[in-house]
Image (cartoon, helix red, strand yellow):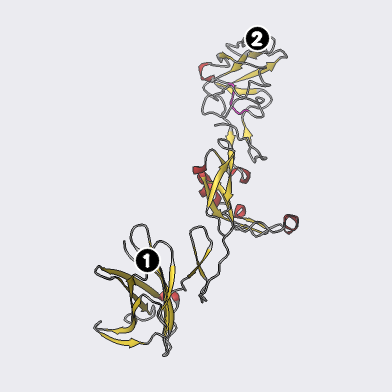
Amino acid sequence: MVAWTGWRARAVAISAVAAGTSTACGGQVESTRASGGSETAAGSGARTPASGGEGTGGWSAGGGGTHGDEPTTAGTGAEGASNGAATAGGAGGAATAGTGIVGSAGTGALGGSSGTAGSLVVGEDSLDDCGGDAECIVVPYDHCCGATRRAINSAYAALYQAHPEWQIFDDPGACSVLGACQDDSRVTAAICTGEPAGFCELVFPESCPALDCELDCPFGSWNDETGCATCACAAPAPTLTTQDLQAPSTTVTLLATPGLLDGDIRRTFLTVRFRYDDPTTEDEELWFTVRITLMHPPIEVTETMATYLLSPRDPGLEEVNATQDFDPLDTSIPIEVSSGFLSIRELSDGALDGAVYLTSPNGTTLGGAFETAP
C-alpha cells in the first residue's frame, strides 16, 4: 500500500521498520548504512548491494531472501535518501523503489518471508484523498461557520458514518476567525482537484438568476435540479383537514394516476386520491379525490415545472372537481374548491410529478406532492 502523501498534513500512523532493524525468519537482521550508498546486513546470508559513488543498490521485493538474504535490484540515487522508500506490503515486507527515507516514509520490512508489514491508519484529514472525480461524494456536515456539506472519497463513506466526531466542527474561536462559510445549500456534486493524487472538493453552482414571479406560493418556490428557486409553487406536507379533523401528515397518503386523450384537442386527466388512515382505529379511514383536466393547448406539460391556479381556474384547466368518497366508492359528496394550485411537469420516463393544494369553504384542505407511474 502506498504511503499517504498529499497537499495537506496527513493523520497517518506507520509502524514497520524502526532504526533500521527488521525481523526475518525469527532472527534479527541489523542493517548498517554507510555514506556512499553501500549497506552491509549482518546475519545469515548477508549481502552488500551493488555499490557506487551515490549507491546504485535499492531494496526491491524482499520475499526472495532468507535470514536477511535479500536480492538487490539496480536503482538510482542514494539508498535511504532518494531511492530507498519501502511501502507497506503483506507478509514478507515487500519493498519497492520510490522516494523518501526508509523508516519514515517507507513501511516495508527489509526481510524475508516473515518480514513485518506496516500498518496504516486513515484519519479525518485523509477522507478527501482521491484519484478521480468518480470517487468523490457529498455527505452531510455541521460546521459552526454554517457549512452543511463536505466532500469525501466514497470509499470512506462507512468510516465517516462510524465517526460522529468527524461530522461536526464546533470551535467558536476558530469560526470567529473564519467567518461565515459559502452557502452550500445548493451543492449536489463534488470533484477531485489535482487528480490523480488529489482531494475532493464541493462544486458550487453558479448564482441563481433573479426571479420576477407573479404567483404568491404559500409553501415557497419549487427548486430546480441545481437548487435554484423557480416561479413554480412547492408542495406542502401531506395535508388532509376537515371541520372535525386535522390529520397528521404521516397518516395521509396520495395516489396519482394520469390519463391522456388524443383528438382535435389533447387532454391530460389527472386523478389524485387522498387517504387518511387512523392508526389508533382499525377501520377508520377517510377518502378524498381530486380530478383535474388539462387541455393541450394552451397548457403544455414539459420537463419544466409549471403552476396553474385551480380557482379561479387558469386557462387550459378544463375541469377541477373534488369529492369526499364513502364506501362503496360510488358514493361521494362534492367539495367546492375556493382556492388552490397545481404544479406539474413530465419526467424523462413519461411519468408526471408535482404538487396539488386546495381549500374549500366548508373547511376541507387537501395537499401534497405526487408522482405517477411511468
Q: Point out the stretch of residues depicted in magenta.
A: 106-110
Q: Nearer the viewer, mark 1 or mark 2?
A: 1
> Residue at image x 62%, y 10%?
48
Image location (x, y in percent) of residue 119: 58, 35
178 and 106: which is toward the camera: 178
User: Which amino acid type is shown beneath numbered disc 2?
Assistant: Ser
Please determine whether, in this image, residue 340 is positioned above or below residue 162. below
Q: Secondary structure at mark 1?
A: loop
> Residue at image x 34%, y 66%?
372
Compared across the picture, whether 81 is left or right of 129 comes to: right
User: Which amino acid type is shown beneath numbered disc 1?
Assistant: Val
319 and 348: which is toward the camera: 319
Is 109 contained in the magenta span? Answer: yes
40 and 323: which is toward the camera: 323
Is 362 contained in the magenta span? Answer: no
Please determine whether, in this image, residue 47 is positioned above or below residue 97. above
Residue at numbered disc 1: 301
Image location (x, y in percent) of residue 61: 53, 20
Badge 1 crowding class, 10 Å Cα cut-off, few under 14, some 14 to 19, many 20 or more, is some
Image location (x, y in percent) of residue 328: 24, 83
295 and 321: which is toward the camera: 295
Image location (x, y in percent) of residue 252: 40, 75
How many marks the image carries: the answer is 2
Residue at numbered disc 2: 51
Precedes in sequence: disc 1 or disc 2 = 2
Q: Main secondary structure of the magenta part?
A: loop
Badge 2 crowding class, 10 Å Cα cut-off, few under 14, some 14 to 19, many 20 or more, is some
Please determine whether, in this image, residue 159 is positioned above or below residue 95. below
